[in-house]
Image (tube, rainbow, N blue to C red):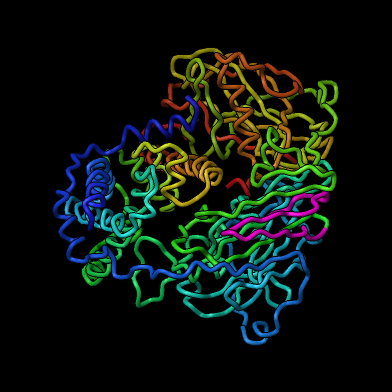
């Protein structure tokens, strides 16, 4: 590793490691987030010639895939345990743990693609262009998907609220 | 607040607050120096070979592949059946034939082909895939279809899923659409919206991390339809330059290259290609446009394409008496927007079951033929403290196809406490078609912006069909924060609509 390469890598890490770590931490535990962060930058190192000039969306895209690989590994390791426990298989592994339980449930009803589109946009606060880079699609495609993901989440929230209403005494309908 | 803003704010509010503290850089550095590649498999460098292929020729499918590949199950879209009167519509049988255009794959196997699927609602969708026995489909390679190695036929309906490869046709039925250059999987799956999640080139004993497909299983592709007056397409890529003659009356083109070194594909259709090819189309009159700027009217005026929207619809053409009535027992689908303050609106919480509502009926004197026009309604009611929002409601149809003279309308659920005099306006609203991705989003968004942003002083949307006033009685106790709930479009085919909306 040349000193220039080392400097470049160090600057990249200094600038974005915490953002990548936060991304992973919002979707996993700290131990996993640490591993994901390290692996993302190992990928960045190996592919240093193709890291774009605006690297953060690209890093999120790598992090998303590394995280998925981590989950698959964890799922394989825990397969037996899951079979004999009351594990709720309908709950997506990447479902975030958030206090807004209705929103969490609604997010859980979305496809992973819709969910990630929304979370990159509103949790990681990426611009639509950056989300498109992270997800590997065109901006026009992203615009359509973002619009539809919002609609599906709205619909999922409405369904959830209906369920709650049914249980609430005195509610309309 | 608009529904999308409400969703955005709720998501932002729920964003977990985390104390990010990445591992020290030295820890990563140590792994680099130990040769940790962060994954079990590194993409092998491959020579950047461009095999090109292309064409403008109608060549018969290569005999080698056709005789050796067995046909597997037909691809299932996994989506509800398309409707001929809703959304992008349903494919016209006359447009389901695969074009004679065949493009050899640069690595081998079945050739590539395409068809232009036209729909009952005036849209056209490009469908590209491998071709076997005159059918277009995808290959069961990698994890796709459990690596069965079979050819899986695509139906014309697959081209409509997501409508990302669909555009509005012009005033004469011509198609203008350009896709790519983009990275696609060699099995063709990444070109199918409903199947893109299954793009997975790795074999079972390999890992899938990071990028999903090695370059050997990827292609760089571009395809589109340039209209009847496109004369040639000049392509420059990796130091090569050549011209393609557009094929057939729609002026279609299909380019398939080996993927350049370093290419990867994401799980979604339309992954932008690195170092993409540059293309320029030349028309019969000598004018030319760079792709994809052909979709930008400021940069390109494609010859032979006419997006004029036809004769202007006047108030006298759409005027019709509005019949508005109160009903104690209605039910419906999605809620309308409710204005909650200056420049903002929110979608009222939907409620199930039956309840009091407002029924608005009228005759659609001007028909609705596609997702570029619709009827809508705006309603004003007195401000009642127990009611959600400030008093303006907006509902719009899902713009189903309507024949001139057909009865149609809206049903809007009301909260019992929201009584008083309701007044409103039914209007006809349309947008100018263009080559944007098809569907109703643009139509609905443009209409909604006019209704929910009075602070912008935008004129009210559409051409007025008629006005109405109706007295809503006070029926009892305050019953929760919701003002309104689902709407249902009432037409003579309401049963079908309900099914598709449901």
Q: Kindly indicate the quadrant of the structure image that contains residue A92.
A: bottom left
Give the residue drawn at x 30%, y 47%.
A96
Residue A142 in the image: state x and y as whole percent. Answer: 51, 45
Note whether B421 is above or below B371 in the view shown: above
Residue B373 in the figure: left or right of residue B262: right
Give the residue drawn at x 64%, y 28%.
B447
Please check the rendered image and state whether residue B239 is part of the magenta-colored stretch, yes or no: yes
Front in this rendered view, residue B216 or B285 = B285
Which portion, as a residue range, is magenta?
Answer: B224-248
Give the residue drawn at x 32%, y 32%.
B13
Front in this rendered view, residue B12 or B248 = B248
Please check the rendered image and state whether residue B18 is part of the magenta-colored stretch, yes or no: no
Residue B340 in the image: state x and y as whole percent. Answer: 48, 20
Residue B307 in the image: state x and y as whole percent. Answer: 78, 37
Note whether B434 is above or below B88 in the view shown: above
Residue B335 in the image: state x and y as whole percent. Answer: 54, 33
**Can residue A55 be seen in this snapshot?**
yes
Q: Kindly indicate the quadrant of the structure image that contains residue B153.
A: bottom right
Front in this rendered view, residue B490 or B174 = B174
Residue B344 in the figure: left or right of residue A5: right
Residue B57 in the figure: left or right of residue B187: right
**Can residue A21 be seen in this snapshot?**
no
All told, the count of numbered labels is 0
Residue B416 in the figure: left or right of residue B243: left
């Amino acid at each position: 590793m040349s000193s220039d390469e080392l400097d470049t890598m160090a600057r990249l890490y200094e600038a974005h490691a915490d953002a990548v770590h936060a991304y992973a931490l919002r979707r996993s535990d700290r131990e996993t987030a640490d591993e994901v962060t390290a692996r993302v930058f190992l990928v960045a190192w190996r592919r240093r010639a193709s890291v774009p000039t605006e690297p953060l969306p690209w890093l999120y895209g790598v992090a998303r895939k590394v995280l998925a690989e981590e989950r698959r590994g964890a799922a394989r390791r825990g397969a037996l345990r899951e079979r004999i426990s009351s594990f709720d298989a309908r709950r997506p592994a990447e479902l975030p743990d958030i206090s807004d339980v209705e929103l969490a449930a609604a997010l859980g009803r979305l496809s992973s693609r819709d969910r990630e589109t929304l979370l990159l946009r509103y949790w990681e606060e990426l611009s639509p262009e950056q989300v498109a880079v992270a997800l590997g699609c065109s901006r026009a495609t992203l615009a359509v998907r973002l619009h539809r993901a919002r609609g599906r989440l709205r619909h999922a929230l409405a369904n959830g609220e209906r369920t709650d209403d049914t249980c609430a005494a005195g509610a309309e309908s | 607040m608009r529904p999308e803003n409400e969703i955005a704010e709720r998501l932002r509010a729920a964003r977990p607050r985390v104390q990010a503290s990445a591992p020290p850089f030295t820890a990563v550095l140590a792994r680099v120096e130990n040769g940790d590649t962060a994954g079990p498999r590194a993409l092998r460098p491959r020579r950047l070979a461009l095999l090109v292929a292309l064409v403008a020729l109608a060549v018969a499918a290569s005999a080698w592949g056709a005789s050796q590949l067995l046909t597997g199950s037909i691809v299932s879209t996994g989506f509800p059946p398309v409707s001929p009167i809703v959304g992008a519509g349903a494919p016209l049988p006359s447009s389901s034939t695969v074009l004679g255009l065949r493009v050899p794959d640069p690595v081998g196997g079945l050739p590539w082909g395409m068809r232009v699927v036209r729909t009952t609602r005036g849209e056209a969708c490009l469908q590209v895939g491998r071709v076997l026995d005159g059918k277009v489909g995808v290959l069961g390679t990698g994890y796709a279809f459990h690596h069965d190695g079979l050819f899986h036929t695509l139906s014309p309906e697959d081209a409509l899923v997501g409508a990302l490869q669909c555009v509005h046709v012009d005033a004469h039925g011509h198609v203008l659409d350009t896709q790519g250059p983009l990275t696609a999987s060699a099995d063709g799956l990444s070109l199918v919206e409903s199947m893109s999640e299954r793009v997975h080139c790795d074999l079972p004993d390999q890992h899938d991390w990071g990028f999903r497909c090695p370059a050997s299983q990827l292609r760089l592709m571009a395809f589109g339809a340039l209209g009847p007056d496109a004369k040639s397409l000049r392509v420059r890529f990796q130091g090569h330059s050549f011209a393609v003659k557009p094929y057939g009356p729609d002026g279609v083109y299909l380019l398939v290259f080996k993927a350049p070194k370093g290419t990867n594909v994401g799980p979604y259709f339309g992954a932008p290609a690195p170092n993409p090819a540059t293309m320029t189309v030349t028309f019969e009159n000598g004018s030319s446009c760079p792709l994809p700027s052909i979709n930008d009217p400021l940069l390109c005026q494609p010859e032979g394409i006419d997006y004029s929207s036809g004769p202007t619809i006047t108030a006298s053409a759409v005027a019709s008496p509005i019949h508005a009535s109160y009903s104690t027992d209605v039910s419906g689908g999605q809620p309308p927007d409710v204005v909650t303050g200056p420049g903002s609106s929110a979608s009222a919480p939907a409620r199930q079951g039956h309840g009091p509502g407002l029924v608005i009926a009228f005759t659609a004197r001007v028909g609705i033929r596609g997702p570029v026009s619709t009827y809508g309604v705006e309603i004003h009611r007195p401000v009642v403290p127990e009611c959600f929002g400030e008093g303006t409601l907006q509902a719009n149809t899902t713009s189903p196809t309507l024949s001139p003279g057909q009865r149609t309308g809206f049903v809007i659920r009301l909260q019992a406490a929201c009584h008083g005099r309701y007044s409103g306006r039914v209007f006809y609203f349309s947008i100018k078609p263009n080559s944007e991705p098809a569907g109703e989003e643009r139509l609905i968004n443009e209409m909604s912006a006019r209704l929910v942003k009075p602070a912008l002083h935008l004129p009210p949307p559409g051409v007025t069909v008629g006005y109405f006033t109706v007295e809503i009685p006070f029926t009892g106790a305050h019953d929760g924060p919701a003002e309104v709930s689902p709407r249902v479009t009432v037409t003579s085919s309401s049963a079908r609509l309900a099914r598709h909306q449901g």
